[in-house]
Amino acid sequence: MLTREQRSCCMSQIKFKNNKPELALRKALWSLDYSYRLKNRLPEKTDLFFLSLRTVVFVDGCF
């Protein structure tokens, strides 16, 4: 069992952007000529945003 401080230290090291699953998906979509944006004005933190489709994608990365 981890203490609160140990867990906080562990969680602060986790990379939430540009993780392996997200990069793999972006690379596959780019090779299929899908255009997407990484930044948008939505309140949620989306991973990919398809403006023409009005669709957002959330990628659950690995720890």
Image (cartoon, rainbow, N blue to C red):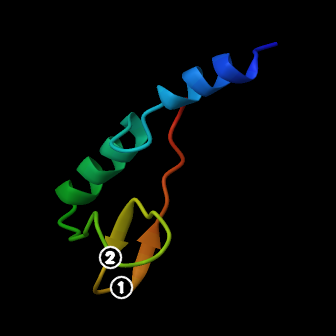
- x 37%, y 44%: residue: 17
Indicate left or right for 17 with 57 as reference: left
Q: Is residue 8 above or below residue 1?
A: below
Counting from the top left corner in percent of width and height, residue 19 is at 38, 37
What amino acid is at disc 2? Phe
Question: Is residue 54 or residue 28 the one in the foreground?
Answer: 54
Position of the C terminus by quadrant = top right
Callouts 1 and 2 close, C-beta under 8 Å:
yes
Q: Is residue 63 above or below residue 17?
A: above
Mark 2 closeness class: few <14, some 14–19, many ≥20 residues within 10 Å: some
Q: Quick one: 3 or 56, which is closer to the camera?
A: 3
Decide which of 32, 42 is in the foreground and name it: 42
Q: Point out residue 48 in the picture as x, y percentages from the top left corner.
A: 36, 64
Residue on which disc 1 sits: 53
Residue placed under numbered mark 2 in the picture: 50
- Please tell me which residue is depicted at 57% across the width and 29% down the height of the picture: 11
Horizontal side of 22 relative to 52 (left or right) equals right
Check disc 2 and report its element: helix, strand or loop: strand
Find residue 34 and name its label: none
| Residue 49: image location, x then y, percent | 35, 72
* Image height of 63 relative to 50, above or below: above
Residues packed near mark 1 inside 10 Å, few (<14), some (14 to 19) or many (20 plus) = few
Q: Quadrant of the N terminus?
A: top right
Check the image and report above or below for 59 versus 40.
above
Between marks 1 and 2, how big is the CA–CA gap?
5 Å
Q: Outermost residue, top direction?
A: 1
Residue 35 in the image: x percent, y percent?
Answer: 20, 71
Q: Residue at x 29, y 52 (%)?
A: 26
Q: Residue furthest right?
A: 1
What's under tag 1, amino acid-wise? Leu
Tell me the element at label 1.
loop
